[in-house]
């Protein structure tokens, strides 16, 4: 941690992930050199009784008054679209999400994808550039978006996203990442395939391991050299 004192952390969003992060920051933050300085939620009433009134930020535009070093966004993606630039004027921004292939009840789809229907045990709802998927699956395409940001030579148009509704995945989210290079002189190419299974409650958007992953990412981000920008941890 930095020598200047505790890292001042703000949390934007108070759903399941936000509640978990706030709880850990309050309980473990001081011993780890972290100080929770504000919590903001679109519905302030959701914080009543669990977030101390002094930490409740009523207007996101006033976050600069709390002088945060790090802001963790665990709200709807449109919050970053609307306020991301403003947040970055005052603090580092940790913007991480996880997307899963899962049972249809675990999706929160918008636009034309909201009307997509499963046609069998396993249905591909979307396959194409990540850029075309993110606006309609903002809660289920974040792993794909992170991959697009991490591979600037491909970006949102070059990375292919596939969203699958699988009726057998009633208690888990599954992510498969396949990476392949250009074929060599003998026609073979370098390839990497990772497969991840994250236990989840039926119909849940957030997997069980995701809560811990967010907490660990927050700790890693606070150990990075202080600089503006979006950190992928």
Image (cartoon, helix red, strand yellow):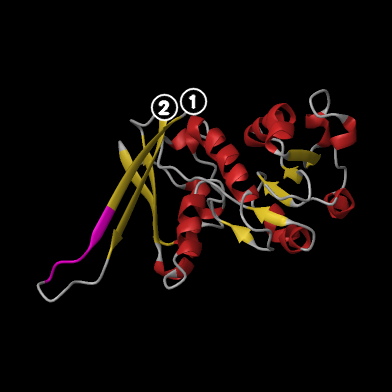
The x and y percentages for residue 33 are 72, 39
Q: Is residue 224 magenta?
A: no
Regarding residue 25, the answer to whether it shows in the image is no
Instruction: Name the residue rendered at 24%, 72% in the picture.
Output: 182
Magenta range? 187-192
Question: Which residue of the protein is positioned furthest toward the front in this rendering?
Answer: 3
Q: Badge 1: few (under 14), some or many (20 or more) residues near its Cα, within 10 Å?
A: some
Drawn side of residue 132 relative to residue 78, left or right: left
- Above or below, 134 relative to 152: above
Query: Quadrant of the rendered structure where residue 38 is?
Result: top right
Chain-order first, disc 1 or disc 2: 2
Seen at 51% across and 54% down, the residue is 112
Alpha carbon distance from label 1 to label 2:
6 Å
For residue 88, what is the image quadrant?
bottom right
Estimate how packed mark 2 is, as few (under 14), some (14 to 19) or many (20 or more) residues with alpha carbons within 10 Å.
some
Q: Check the image and report above or below for 8 versus 131.
A: above
**Of 187 and 91, the residue lying toward us:** 91
Left or right: residue 225 versus residue 102 is: right
Label 1 sits on residue = 201
The reply to whether discs 1 and 2 touch (Cβ–Cβ < 8 Å) is: yes
Residue at (56, 46) in percent of width and height: 139
Please identify the quarter of the rendering in which residue 27 is found.
Answer: top right
Q: Nearer the viewer, residue 151 or 138?
A: 151
Please tell me the numbered disc located at residue 171. Answer: 2
Q: Is residue 30 left or right of residue 150?
A: right
């Amino acid at each position: 941690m930095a020598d200047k004192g505790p890292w001042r952390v703000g949390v934007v969003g108070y759903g399941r992930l936000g509640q978990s992060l706030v709880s850990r920051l309050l309980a473990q933050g001081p011993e780890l050199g972290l100080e929770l300085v504000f919590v903001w939620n679109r519905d302030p009433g959701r914080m009543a009784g669990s977030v101390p009134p002094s930490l409740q930020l009523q207007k996101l535009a006033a976050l600069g008054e709390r002088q945060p070093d790090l802001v963790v966004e665990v709200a709807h993606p449109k919050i970053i679209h609307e306020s991301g630039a403003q947040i970055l004027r005052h603090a580092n921004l940790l913007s991480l999400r996880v997307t899963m292939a899962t049972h249809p009840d675990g999706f929160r789809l918008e636009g034309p994808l909201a009307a997509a229907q499963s046609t069998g045990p396993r249905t591909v709802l979307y396959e194409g550039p990540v850029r075309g998927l993110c606006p309609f699956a903002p809660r289920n395409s974040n792993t794909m978006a992170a991959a697009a940001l991490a591979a600037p030579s491909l970006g949102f148009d070059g990375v292919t996203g596939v969203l699958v509704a699988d009726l057998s995945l009633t208690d888990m989210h599954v992510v498969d990442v396949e990476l392949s290079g250009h074929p060599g002189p003998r026609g073979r190419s370098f390839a990497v395939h990772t497969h991840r299974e994250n236990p989840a409650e039926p119909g849940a958007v957030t997997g069980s391991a995701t809560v811990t992953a967010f907490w660990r990412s927050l700790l890693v981000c606070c150990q990075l050299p202080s600089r503006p920008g979006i950190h992928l941890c």
